[in-house]
Image (spheres, helix red, strand yellow):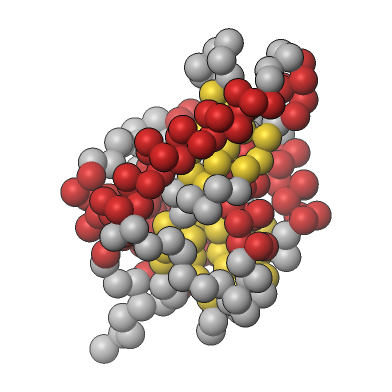
Amino acid sequence: MQNIIFESTEDALKPLLDVINIKNLPLSNAILINIGREGVTLAHELATKLKIPMEFLFTQIIPSPLNSECPIAVVSEDMEMVINESLVNAFDISPDYVYNEAQRQYEEVILPSLYQFKKGEGLESLKGKDVLLFDIGIDTGLRMGVAIKTCMNMKAKSLCVVAPVMPKSIYDFLCEICDDVCCPYPLENYVTTLHYFPHLNVIDDEAFEEALNQTTTQKDT
């Protein structure tokens, strides 16, 4: 069994670049979209190395009313949703709860964040673009699922999921629905993202905003 531990987020950069280089992805009209605030520093470094622009897609987890630690759905900044139907049905959770909670999370969390960090502007047009969807780790796949749905609706030319680690089962599923998946460590016995990044720090507002505003496309001199 692989014992993959990243002492810092920077340790994941080289394995990611190695996989991306092997895949020979189309990058001339590409954009990297980061979907997790905790991974924004690594996403920025990756986009800088690839010399492609970086954007951020705001999403918000909808927890079960029975267990706040159990995500049952996720909503994105354009009100797209992905629901874990099996959990919703198993716990007999009302659809009204899910949609009302999604609306509340959108109005109380996502919209204020959009105005605070992106001046109220959502993603730029993705039509005809090759999109690299980045997350620092994938636990349930809900957040990545809603990001894929959002990009498909925005007419992206191609979708490639990029993450240092994810469960092998999710990797196999993403390979079926996306154009490509770049993951150096798809693991059979996946634990949690925090297990593989034990020193993952919370990004404060100032550092987060700085990462979003820094350019990633400067040419070498």
Q: Position of residue 126 (x, y in %)?
A: 56, 72
Residue in the picture at 23% in, 44% down: 205
Image quadrant holding the C terminus, namely: bottom left
Q: 122 or 191, which lies in front?
A: 122
Residue furthest to the right in view is 176
Going by the image, does 178 lie left or right of 135? Answer: right
Q: In the picture shown, does residue 193 fall above or below 159?
A: above
Q: Residue furthest bottom?
A: 221
Residue 180 vs residue 77, the one in the foreground? 77
Query: Whole-percent x and y of residue 117?
Result: 28, 54
Q: Position of residue 64 (x, y in %)?
A: 58, 19
Q: Quadrant location of residue 44?
A: bottom left
Whole-percent x, y for residue 123 in the image: 46, 64
Tell me the residue at 67%/62% (across/down).
152
In the image shown, does 123 or 104 lie closer to the viewer?
Answer: 104
Q: Is residue 34 above or below residue 130?
A: above
Where residue 201 sits, quadrant-wise, is top left
- In the displayed structure, does residue 181 sit left or right of residue 138? right
Q: Is residue 175 left or right of residue 12?
A: right
Q: Is residue 139 visible?
A: no
Viewport quadrant of the N terminus: top right
Total numbered labels placed on residues in the image = 0
In this rendering, does residue 67 appear at all?
A: yes
Q: Residue at x 70, y 31 (%)?
A: 84
Where 102 sits versus 20, above or below? Answer: above
Compare residues 19 and 194 and report the one nearer the observer. 194
Establish if 104 lies above or below 79. above
Determine the residue located farthest toward the top in the rendered image.
Answer: 66
